[in-house]
Image (cartoon, rainbow, N blue to C red):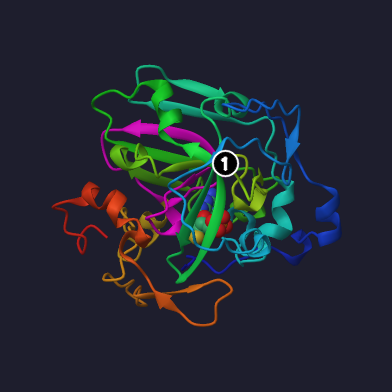
Amino acid sequence: MLIRRPHDVPPSEITPKSVFAQRRHFLQFAAGGALSLALPAAHAGDKLPIAARSPLSTDEEPTPYRHIAGYNNFVEFGNGKEVPAERAHRLRTAPWSVTLDGLVHKPRTLAIEDILKLAPLEDRVYRLRCVEGWSMVVPWVGFSLSALLKQVEPLSSARYVAFESVVQPDTQPGVRFPLLDWPYTEGLRLDEAMHPLTLAAVGLYGEVMPNQNGAPIRLIVPWKYGFKSAKSIVRIRFTDHEPPTTWNNLQPEEYGFYANVNPEVSHPRWSQARERRIGDFLKRPTRMFNGYADQVGQLYAGLDLHKYY
Ligand code: MTE
């Protein structure tokens, strides 16, 4: 993706992998849902209590863990696909809470431990298509975001939801530079946010989320380009207007608000007709709505997808 200014983080910020291995952060968990296996403490790599494999999962072969957790975009840690895995161990993921406010009856700030009790955790194997032209198959762990959004009882005037990622200048070297406008912000229409496919993800491969993938809780919207899926969320705000979003603010003609995966609408600088699945040699055709057209196509009935890209 195009970054406005080419500054990056000084090499002195790079932490050797040996240090990374010794300094994993700890996340207090109270496991919720049907299995209720109470984990006193959990950290990246710990097993999560999973109630079921979601029928919304794809049968495609998941991308190896080392790629999913080693090839990332998380600009708060700097530019470069390997940078988040090298630096994200510093992120403080405990204590953690998410504030839900704006056009709601009951604004609340919920601790991650309480969020994890809202719904049983499921394995959800989804395709992830990045706007840059690569894709993966990721076995996320999480629950439908709607279970969280319902907690605050949205007002009938609420039509959109804005998601804000954490800003920790002492742990995220990238936020000390104007690489993007901070905090990283994304948005969805409320009906998109409430759709059963839209996931609040807390792990992958059956384990607590690695920090570089957006611990302790992130958004996953599998029919949209990856940049919509904000990581390490601290705030969810309900509004009556389309919220400003980071990539759309930066380059509106390149990154639309909708960002639905669409092989027929090219990015101004490259075609979106094909994608390279990480680990494959040959490219494959990109599918409309990333292959989720049967589930989400009706959300966009009557909308000109060339205009609302
Ligand atoms: N969220 C935040 N806060 N910061 C980011 O830089 N990058 C986005 C998205 N969410 C990003 C983010 C982009 S461009 C992609 S493709 C996905 O995260 C990558 O998710 P992954 O690293 O888990 O594959």
Residue 53 x %, y %: 53, 44
Question: Could you say where residue 24 lies in the image, as x and y percent from the top left?
Answer: 78, 46
* Quadrant in the picture for residue 251: bottom left
Residue range highlighted in magenta: 217-245
Residue at x 32%, y 74% (from the top left corner): 268
208 left or right of 6? right
Name of the residue lying farthest toward the left? 302
Please tell me how many numbered marks the rendered image carries: 1
- Does the rendering let one see residue 16? no
Closest to the observer, 78 or 55: 55
**Magenta stretch encompasses residue 257:** no
Measured from the top left, where is residue 189 in percent x and y? 30, 42
Q: Amino acid at mark 1?
A: Val
Is the shortest distance between ligand 1 and the CB of mark 1 under 8 Å? yes
Residue at image position (60%, 52%) is 213
Residue at disc 1, secondary structure = loop
Query: Is residue 235 in the magenta section?
Result: yes
Which residue is disc 1 drawn over? 166
Q: Residue furthest top?
A: 106
Neighbour class for label 1 at 10 Å: few (<14), some, many (≥20)?
A: many
User: In this picture, is 172 found above or below 38?
Assistant: below
Asked if residue 68 can be seen in this view, the reply is yes
Residue 243 x %, y %: 33, 42
Q: Quadrant of the C terminus?
A: bottom left
- The residue lying toward the viewer, choosing from 292 and 213, is 292
Residue occupying image coordinates x 50% and y 37%: 143
Residue at image location 52% in from the left, 25% down from the top: 118
For this rendering, which residue is in front, 194 or 35? 35
The quarter holding residue 122 reads top right
